[in-house]
Amino acid sequence: MEIRNNLSAAGLAPSIRTMFILASDKTLRLSHRWEVSMGAPVVTVDGQYVGRNWTQWTQGFAYGNAILCYDATDHPDLLEVGRSLTHAHMAEHLTHTGVHDHGFNNLSTYGQLRRLILEGRLESNDSELRSYELALKVSGAVQAARWTSLPGGRGYIYSFNGSHSLFIDTIRTVRICGVAHKLGHGLMGEQDCRINLLGRLLTHARTSAEFNIYYGEGRDSYDLAEARGRTVHEAIFNPVSGTFRCPSSQQGYSPFTTWTRGLAWAMLGFAEELEFIGSLPESDFASDGVMTKEEAIFFLEKAARATCDFYISQASTLDGICYWDTGAPDLRYLGNWKSSRADPFNQYEPVDSSAAAIAAQGLIRLGHAMGEAGRIYLNAGLTIAEVLLKEPYLSSNPQHEGILLHSIYHRPNGWDHVQKGAKIPFGESSMWGDYHLLELGLLILRLAENKYYTFF
């Protein structure tokens, strides 16, 4: 990746404002067309959003898009859409015991609305704020209850695959437990045992850092120094004995290559948790079973830096965009792809712009957390953002319902639309890709205004 050191948040602000105008119109039009009976909008097919009955993990992104657009534009219709649809349809996600997606759905809606109230950005009464905070408490506790214990006090929130499965995706959703903890909540278990939600967050994060991230320390034959930061989508455990069995991949090419959206979830998740832990007083770490603040910061920064370094050196192209997997088999036909700009229209392997958008936010947040020492990460994030904010990635066609083009959902399962005459998917959007481009844009706008924001 060729990092551009001459970019600034203020310099990107005009392009971001243009993007939000475009996104606001698309978000409003989709909200008028979409019926809740259709499920959640997931991906586009020929430019039109459709659902996919796997899980409803994108519903919060659909409503969150409207809230983010309101944040950037102050358009009251967008607030009405995001607020009313959250009130009407998101409650079932608060008590959903079958998924690892609570942070995706509920922080994108209830969490964003709470933040706007606390910032004085929307009129509300005390009961509305308290209802959002109650929702976040419930969601954090329900998510924390989806737990597999491991020997030595370790454990993890298990994925929808079952109690044996630790997904790297969850490192971004587990922040819901942090918000619930900060609101004074805990998870009540058997015999009225109170489970500390900060402790559960940190235990999950440490297990993810230990088993889903590789540090060039020889854990397996492919754990090489030059591949420090390699990330595996899924870690498999024996849930009876708690023994780690093997790496796996639900959506990547193989357990020994890196699915780039999983890498991006790790980059952003570890960076955000690093920000969160750094904001807490030492007294929060005094409870039994909670590691020290120093221990937490050490492993979170180690994982965040390793994954961000891997993206920059191993996973991205010259312009900072990534293909869907670092080991995708037909990348060999693209020659030295790391030294060329990404080509979403090639005939061999698709790019995943959604992974790039998520990764860019992770880079910026890590860079911000590290101060001057993190300048390389901040500049890398701005470099990616500058590319995504224009064609061929920004969808300027008003008839196309997506905002960010060339997103990939599930390449191994063949779930992405392939246009007639093409060999690979391109030109389509995803709800998480759109949402994370908007989050990225809002973050950069706030940087330009010296109004940095966080999920907590």
Image (cartoon, rainbow, N blue to C red):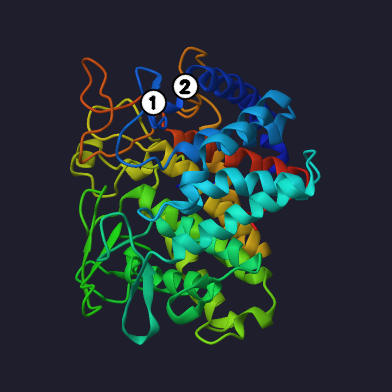
Residue picked out by circle 1:
38
Q: Quick check: 77 left or right of 315?
A: right
Asked if residue 373 can be seen in this view, the reply is: no
Residue that appears at 61% across and 70% down: 277
Residue 136, percent from left and from top: 58, 55
Residue 320, percent from left and from top: 46, 43
Residue 66, percent from left and from top: 60, 31
- Amino acid, disc 2: Trp
Q: Quick check: 366 left or right of 72?
A: left
Task: Indicate the secondary structure of the residue bearing disc 2.
Answer: loop
Residue that appears at 52% across and 61% down: 140
- Amino acid, disc 1: Met
Task: Indicate the secondary structure of the residue bearing disc 1.
Answer: helix
Separation of marks 2 and 1 at Cα, in angstroms: 7 Å
Residue that appears at 61% across and 27% down: 19
Q: How many marks?
A: 2
In terms of depth relative to the viewer, which is nearer, 43 or 140? 140
State if disc 1 and disc 2 touch (CB < 8 Å).
yes
Q: On screen, 63 above or below 311?
A: above
**What residue occupies the far top of the structure in this picture?**
399
Q: On screen, 428 above or below 312?
A: above
Residue picked out by circle 2:
34
